[in-house]
Image (cartoon, rainbow, N blue to C red):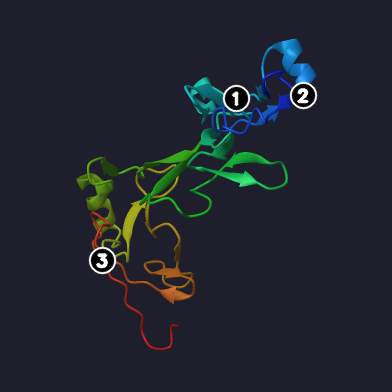
């Protein structure tokens, strides 16, 4: 900025901080001031910011539909954005992509009987002979299966009784996800080497775990 009676005094054009917050001020030389009729130049807002009145404000790139994949969601950050994995997906460090989590295979789903993995989530269903109570998320044994289990003397299965695969008459005991039928006593269930005694055979809801001495 030129001052003095003969405009021979050069002052700092940026001394009064004329530029908006977030930008840089550059003082111009006397020759530049004369040629451009201004004493300073303000820089543009940094990448990811835009001018709003007297400040630079962050641009929310997520509202501008930046390209994250179907398995990702956009997360706005200061001056930028990032794509993060949606719930039900996990970042693969090798491919740097979000891969579906198979909750059924990893035994993290809360299904009682049958689990079907889908993109980002899973669905639960019941074995034949059971009816899904969608409100409680429970599989309820119907009367015809209950009668066949009694006829086969399997009404005292540790967990419950079901039809064998591809059969509408033959029945067997089964265990909850994460447990296996005991190899010697097919009415019992084993989990991690411990016999787990489960009660509540028709609704499979209230579960009591008893560990006897020597089983841990």
CB atoms of marks 1 and 3 within 8 Å: no
Labels 2 and 1 touching (C-beta < 8 A)? no
Of the residues tagged 2 and 1, which is closer to the observer? 2
What element does badge 3 sit on?
Answer: loop
Q: Which residue lies under the disc numbered 3?
A: 199
Mark 2 is surrounded, within 10 Å at the Cα level, by few (under 14), some (14 to 19) or many (20 or more) other residues, namely: some
- Which residue does the numbered mark 1 point to in the structure image? 67
As drawn, 120 above or below 213: above
The quarter of the picture where the N terminus appears is: top right
The CA span between labels 2 and 3 is: 88 Å
Towards the viewer: 45 or 192 = 45
- Where residue 181 sits in the image (x, y, percent)? 44, 65
* Residue at the spot of label 2: 29
- The mark closer to the camera, 1 or 3, is 1
Dot placed on the residue nearer the N-terminal end, 1 or 3: 1
In the rendered view, does 53 fall on the left or right side of 146? right
Label whose residue precedes the other's in the sequence (2 or 3): 2
Label 1 neighbourhood size at 10 Å, few (<14), some (14-19), many (20+)? few
Task: State which tag comes first along the sequence, 2 or 1.
Answer: 2
Identity of the residue furthest to the front in this view: 5
Which numbered disc covers residue 135? none
Q: Where is residue 137 drawn, in percent x and y?
A: 28, 46
Seen at 32% across and 56% down, the residue is 161
């Amino acid at each position: 900025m030129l001052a003095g009676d003969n405009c021979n005094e050069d002052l700092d054009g940026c001394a009064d901080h004329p530029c908006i917050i977030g930008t840089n001020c550059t003082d111009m030389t006397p020759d530049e001031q004369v040629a451009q009729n201004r004493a300073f130049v303000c820089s543009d807002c940094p990448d990811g910011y835009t001018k709003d009145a007297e400040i630079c404000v962050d641009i929310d790139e997520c509202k501008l539909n930046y390209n994250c994949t179907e398995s990702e969601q956009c997360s706005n950050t200061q001056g930028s954005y990032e794509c993060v994995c949606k719930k039900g997906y996990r970042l693969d460090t090798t491919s740097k992509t979000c891969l579906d989590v198979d909750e059924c295979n990893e035994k993290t789903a809360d299904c009682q009987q049958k689990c079907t993995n889908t993109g980002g989530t899973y669905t639960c269903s019941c074995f034949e002979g059971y009816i899904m109570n969608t409100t409680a998320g429970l599989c309820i044994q119907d009367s015809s299966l209950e009668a066949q289990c009694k006829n086969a003397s399997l009404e005292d299965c540790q967990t419950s009784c079901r039809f064998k695969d591809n059969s509408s008459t033959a029945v067997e005991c089964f265990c909850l996800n994460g447990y296996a039928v005991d190899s010697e006593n097919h009415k019992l269930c084993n989990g991690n080497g411990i016999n787990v005694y489960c009660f509540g055979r028709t609704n499979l809801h209230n579960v009591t775990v008893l560990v006897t001495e020597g089983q841990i």
